[in-house]
Image (cartoon, rainbow, N blue to C red):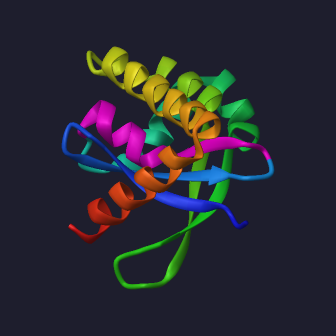
Amino acid sequence: MPNESIIQIFEGKKVRVVWNEQEEKYFFAVTDIVELLTDSADVKQYIKRMRSRDAELDSVWGTICTPHQFVSSDGKKHAVNCASLEGIFRIIQSIPSKKAEPVKQWLAQVGAQRIDQMIDPELTFQMAVEDYRRQAA
């Protein structure tokens, strides 16, 4: 089965997520998570500045972030830097934000949902229906 991408919603904002079947991990779009935490008008510039401020993060960026394909609103596939939960938590450490704790709790909930789905496969079907409805909206 190929990696399946979904949209998760946090406080009304969309977060692109892909389940990597080989690694059995969720990968989250880094720009979407940074946007949640910063409300930055230019997320790519924020990430660039964040990496220049945090040399340790910058040195492991290529290891933390891997590109995954997402279909955009124009129907074309685009590579988006994504990170696993561990990588996202490392990135969150570099962002001074009051929203960090609620985002961490939400990420933990998303991970717990996947564990529940693995235990009860019917939940996977129910989640797929919900994801389809969210994406269609």
Q: Is residue 13 above or below residue 54?
A: below
Q: Is residue 111 above or below residue 27?
A: above
Instruction: Tell whether 36 sits left or right of 59.
Output: left
Q: Quadrant of the C terminus?
A: bottom left
Instruction: Tell whether 80 sits left or right of 103.
Output: right
- Residue 24 falls inside the magenta stretch: yes
Q: How far across and down, in percent of the image, does residue 53 sit?
A: 52, 25
Q: Which residue appears at 39% of the width and 47% of the height? A: 32
Image quarter for residue 35? top left
Q: Quadrant of the N terminus?
A: bottom right
Instruction: Tell whether 124 sits left or right of 72.
Output: right
Q: How far across and down, in percent of the image, does residue 93 sit?
A: 50, 17
Query: Where does the magenta region start and end?
Result: 23-39
> Closer to the camera, 125 or 26?
125
Task: Give the residue at the far bottom of this rendering.
Answer: 75
Disc tally is 0
Q: Which residue appears at 59% of the width and 46% of the height? A: 121
Instruction: Tell whether 48 sits left or right of 83.
Output: left
Task: Give the residue at the far right of this rendering.
Answer: 22
- Residue 45 falls inside the magenta stretch: no
> Closer to the camera, 97 or 42?
97
Q: How far across and down, in percent of the image, does residue 52 sit?
A: 55, 32
Q: How far across and down, in percent of the image, does residue 43 sit?
A: 36, 47
Q: Which residue appears at 23% of the width and 48% of the height? A: 41
> Closer to the camera, 59 or 100?
100
